[in-house]
Amino acid sequence: GAVVSQHPSWVICKSGTSVKIECRSLDFQATTMFWYRQFPKQSLMLMATSNEGSKATYEQGVEKDKFLINHASLTLSTLTVTSAHPEDSSFYICSAVQGSYTDTQYFGPGTRLTVL
Amino acid sequence: AQKITQTQPGMFVQEKEAVTLDCTYDTSDPSYGLFWYKQPSSGEMIFLIYQGSYDQQNATEGRYSLNFQKARKSANLVISASQLGDSAMYFCAMRGTNTNAGKSTFGDGTTLTVKP
C-alpha cells in the first residue's frame, strides 16, 4: 500500500510555543490530505481537509488561527499548532488520498503532542 | 448524512479462532466505499480491506474478509485464525461520492483482544 510519513512522531513543548507537524505522501501524489485529532480510546475527530494550493476547510469548532494548515505541494501538508496550551496535548494523525471516493485513505503514523 | 455504527466496544477471541466485528452504516449516497482499519497500541492506522458499494463479491485480503450485505447496510469484518498480533482497535469507515466532500466517516471502534 501507499506510504504516508509524519514527523515528528512525538514532541514535548512548553506552553505558548508553536509546533509544526509535517505529513508527506512518499510514493503517490495526494489530491487531498486530512488532519485528525484522537483522544485515548476514542475515534478519530476530523479537524480539517486540505487540498493542494487552496485554503484548508476546517470542521466546525476547530480554530483556524490556532491550527494552521498549509498544503504546499501534492506530497506535503503541514499542521502548525500555534501558542500551544496543555489542552492541545493529543495524538494528531494525518492522512492522504490520491483521487476519488473509492481510493483508500492512507494514514501517517501519528504525532503525540504533549504541552507542558 | 453518513453514519457508521460499531456496536461492540470490546471483543475477546481465542487465538486461532475466527472473529466477526460488526459494522452498520447509513448513507444517502448512491455510491460509496467501505473500509476497515486496524489501530494497534502504537497508534498507526493500518488499512485492512476495502469494499465498493457496487462490488458483487465480498472483499478478501489474506485472513481478512468483509461480509457485505447491502440491503442490511452492514459491512462486518471477519478475521480468521486470530493471532496475538491482531489485538488492536478496529475502525469501520465509509466515504461517499456526494456527502461530506470525500471525507471519511468513522465508527467508534471495537477493541479486539486475542487470548493465548
Image: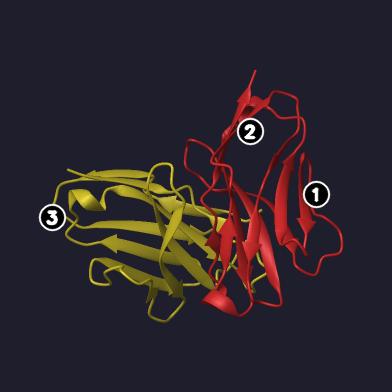
Chain colours: A yellow, B red
Closer-to-camera residue (A71/B17): B17
Can you tell which of label 2 and label 3 is closer to the viewer? Answer: 2
Give the numbered dot on residue B60: 1
Whether residue A27 is visible: no
Disc 3: which residue: A16
Please report, as a chain letter, where disc 3 is located: A
- At label 2, the amino acid type is Asp
Residue B33, horizontal then vertical, whole percent: 68, 66
Residue B68, horizontal then vertical, whole percent: 77, 56
Secondary structure under tag 2 reads: helix
Callout 2: few (<14), some (14-19), or many (20+) C-alpha neighbours within 10 Å? Answer: some
Task: Choose top left, top right, bottom left or bottom right for residue B72.
Answer: bottom right
Marks 3/1: CA–CA distance: 48 Å
- At label 1, the amino acid type is Thr
Give the numbered dot on residue B86: 2
Callout 1: few (<14), some (14-19), or many (20+) C-alpha neighbours within 10 Å? Answer: some
